[in-house]
Image (cartoon, rainbow, N blue to C red):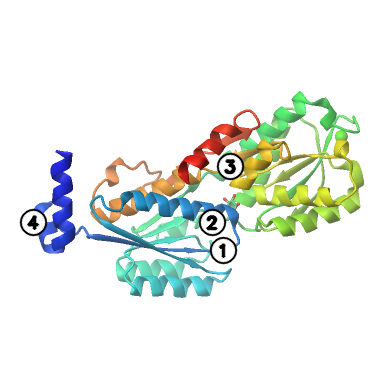
Amino acid sequence: MKAKKRIAAGIVLCIGMQLLSACEKKQPDAASKLHVGVTYYDKSDTFLNELILCFGEKLEEMDHKKIEVSMTVRDAAYSQRTQDDQVKELMDAGCNILCVNLVDRADPSEIIDLGRENHVPIIFFNREPVAEDMLQWDGLYYVGALSEQSGVLQGQLAADAIQKNSHIDRNQDGKIQYVVLEGEPGHQDTIIRTENAVNTLKSKGIELEKLTYGIANWNRAQAQNRMTQMIRQYQNKIELVLANNDDMALGAIDAYKKSNVTESALPVFLGVDGTDIGLKAVADGKMYATVYNDKEGQAAAMAKLAFALIMKKGMKEIEFKNEKYIYLPYEKVTADNVDEFLKAGIKLQ
Ligand code: GAL
Ligand code: CA
């Protein structure tokens, strides 16, 4: 059966659309090519670079099956205007699916209009548009993860660490003096991760004292700067660093490395993402834990959805929330299970 299908697929590829409708009568509109256009907010983002790489690999796996697949990637360099132009250019170049990681998650209207006018479905990813915008057209989808869960898991990991290691409360005042390194203001993951991490710690009976916070826009160098200022201000008082992502946790670790704080006076660092370098820092014992942002799952969901939209089949097998949303679960990563995640990464390369 499978072999027969494959042969049919070969013919479809050679002779094109006409035969396609003859062979697969149920899907007269199915295309023979999947040309994916991807645009993301900025090329400096570690997690997104890994996610997009992974997405390319998932698409490649689908190539040669029944359809010819290609992908074009654009960097919007923090400009929504640039990104709108890129979407137009990609559609003009023949992309029949657009995957958009918005620069400004509150400003997707231009892109939605372009999708509607050109009949090109849009899969938003990682930066979630507001719910009302998602209702503007039925060709809109979102693939990502639930911010709330990442915060809860980070809070649980921090609580575990504190309950198991009484020395984390270095001044033994019964409270944990902490700082937060935040991602971009207005990003769903910044606000919700922080809130849920802190509330989870409190719900576990941990007494907290917030010393300060710094905005570092997901960026390692910015986090290092912010952390350097905090160390100057609070000296050895900081016991816990909650970072909204791994790159910022690593920036904080960089700042400590350059300061003259002794090893025994280091705080506990927690991140989110499980990027390659993030996982390595957990394995090396530099970062206590992270929360895995399932890039493989998200990339596979995007590829499956793109394929189903173009082939006009398989949509029913996809598990949507509210018909448009696909959320992949986060997972806790500590020194105890980091090897499994490192191995999964190796398999991909
Ligand atoms: C978050 C991720 C960050 C950054 C951000 C970009 O989900 O944890 O590291 O990639 O998305 O939108
Ligand atoms: Ca303390």
Q: Say which of 292 and 281 sits in front.
A: 281
Instruction: From the image, tell me which residue sits under label 2.
Output: 49
- Label 1 and label 4: CA atoms lie apart by 43 Å
Q: Quadrant of the N terminus?
A: top left
- Label 4 and label 2: CA atoms lie apart by 41 Å
For badge 1, the amino acid type reads: Lys
Instruction: From the image, tell me which residue sits under label 3.
Output: 148
Q: Secondary structure at mark 2?
A: helix
Label 4 neighbourhood size at 10 Å, few (<14), some (14-19), many (20+)?
few
The yes-or-no answer for disc 2 within 8 Å of ligand 1 is no
Label 3 vs 2, first from the N-terminus: 2
Q: Height in image: 345 above or below 109?
A: above
Label 2 vs 1, first from the N-terminus: 1
Label 3 vs 4, first from the N-terminus: 4
Instruction: From the image, tell me which residue sits under label 1.
Output: 43
For badge 4, the amino acid type reads: Ala
Label 1 vs 4, first from the N-terminus: 4
Horizontal and vertical percent position of residue 13: 19, 58
